Amino acid sequence: MRPLQICPSILAADFSQLGQDVADVMQAGADIVHVDIMDGHFVPNISYGPAVMQSIRHITDRPFDVHLMISPVDPYLEAFAKAGADVITVHAEATPHLHRSLQAIRALGKKAGVALNPGTPASVIAHVLDLTDLVLVMTVNPGFGGQAFIPTMLEKVRQVRDMTAGMAIDIEVDGGITAQNAGDVAAAGANWLVAGSSVFKGGKATFANNINAIRNAAQSARGERV
Ligand code: DX5
Ligand code: ZN
């Protein structure tokens, strides 16, 4: 089993004090910063760009996991690499040349991820696995935080787990992840759990409890000591 990572989505942070929220959530025990980039074209919402990300990159040494919900995507890969991304994930639906996009991310010296919308079958990754470090199974339709987890995505996570067995590929789930479903997604094979609302709800005083609740549920499902 690959290591479990809890990845707060800073889309749910208070943008008026973004740097402080990132510092606090990492201090509270999070593993990876999940950065959602939305363009108002591929998804019906706009978030922020590489300059905002770069402005918070110094706050932690932990990896930055950049989820690009933008189309076209290839022209922006270098900007996010320069802004301090460690993993750059593109949507399979957002690039006509998925293989080329993944090659470009690897050429920038970054880990390459492929994200799949709920309606996209797992099979689209079959011929790019040699260029893939992470598969992101969307468990909501991308564009907004605070949506309800789509339970039928558990089967897709299991399919991705079976397709990637024995490979050095992480499986990430994103959207509606809570302490209530963290066990289910971990049991299905996900090891990177993104969570926005369920981590940031309640403010700084609750961040550690919120993270621990998700981590404990996932660890139990993985048969690890809690
Ligand atoms: C959705 C984003 C998610 C989102 C998660 O388009 O990719 O990362 O912010 O937020 P929650 O955990 O609130 O569903
Ligand atoms: Zn995301």
Image (cartoon, rainbow, N blue to C red):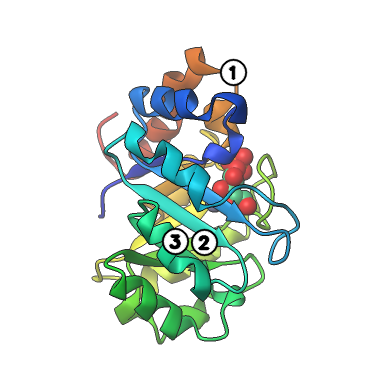
Q: Nearer the viewer, mark 2 or mark 1?
A: 1
The verdict on label 1 being within 8 Å of ligand 1 is: no
Of 190 and 38, the residue lying toward us: 38
Q: Which residue is mark 2?
A: 137
Where does label 1 land, which residue? 202
Residue identified by numbered label 3: 79
How many other residues sit within 10 Å of disc 3, few (<14), some (14-19) or many (≥20)? some
Q: What is the three-letter code of the residue carrying label 3?
A: Ala
Q: Is residue 56 left or right of residue 147?
A: left
Amino acid type indicated by mark 1: Gly
Q: Residue at x 43, y 28 (%)?
A: 211
User: In the image, what residue occupies the spot 36% across and 57% down?
Assistant: 82
Of the numbered discs 3 and 2, the one sitting upstream in the chain is 3
Spot occupied by residue 192 in the image (x, y as percentages of width and height): 39, 50
* Screen quadrant of the C terminus: top left
Reading the chain from its start, which is encountered first: label 3 or label 1?
A: 3
Image point 69% across, 47% down: which residue? 144
Q: Ligand 2 within 8 A of label 2's CB?
A: no
Choose the circle earlier in sequence order: 2 or 1.
Answer: 2
Q: Quadrant of residue 105?
A: bottom left
